[in-house]
Image (tube, rainbow, N blue to C red):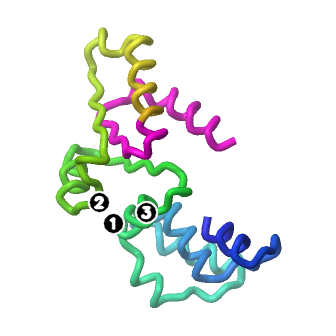
Amino acid sequence: LALQEQRKASGSQGVALDPSTLLDAVLRNFGGRPMELDKVVDTFFRELGMPLPKEEFEKINNVESLVLSNLSEPEARHLMLLTKSNAALGLVFDREILNHERTEIIFGSDFPLDQTDLQVCLDIQRVKLCMAEGITVVLVHCESLYESLYDLLNQHYS
């Protein structure tokens, strides 16, 4: 996205990738893997023969800033935060990453009647409406929706 913005601003198709843009892209794509991030960043910069902007890396290398950056860009791809507990739900509101007025929370269920094709279609429709209105959607225990969302979002981006 940052490279696209550089190209638009310069009116050129041949804008070179600079270290700052590369760092931003790598962090936004791999920042959720903190145990592996240093190795991933080093590999990208080494393979491309670019100097790593260490001060910038230390400054923006935290998940919260990466999430905020993604959510503030209207052209960014949809963000999926995967967690092992519901603690993250409270955190995103407590840290004011999301606000209740512009967020729709959809809770899934393990009950068989809540996993029918009709219910999946209704939930996908809710997601689509929220996307159209620019409302953030938080899915909690919605495993039955993931395959349909994968198809929906890939169609959206192709």
The numbered mark, 3 or 2, whose residue comes first in the sequence reads: 3
Asked whether the residues under the numbered discs 1 and 3 touch, taking CB atoms below 8 Å apart as contact, a structural biologist would say: no
Residue at 46% from the left image edge and 66% from the top image edge: 36
- Give the percent coordinates (x, y) of residue 13: 81, 70
Give the alpha-carbon distance from disc 3 to disc 2, as whole Å. 10 Å
Question: How crowded is the residue under tag 1: few (<14 C-alpha within 10 Å), some, or many (20+)?
Answer: some
Q: Name the residue under label 1.
A: 64
Label 2 sits on a secondary structure element that is: loop
In the rendered image of this protein, does residue 155 appear above or below residue 135?
above
Residue 60 spot, x, y in % from top left: 41, 78
Residue type at numbered disc 2: Ile
Is residue 146 on the magenta stretch? yes
Q: Do the residues labelled 2 and 1 touch (CB within 8 Å)?
A: yes
The quarter in which the C terminus is drawn is: top right
**What residue is shown with label 3?**
72
Where on the picture, by quarter, is residue 6?
Answer: bottom right
Q: Which residue is drawn at 54% across and 88% down?
A: 53
Q: How far apart are marks 1 and 3 (CA)?
A: 12 Å
Q: Taking 122 as reference, is 62 above or below it?
A: below
- The local secondary structure at tag 3 comes to helix
Type of the residue with mark 1: Glu
Q: In this image, 87 relative to 117: left or right?
A: left
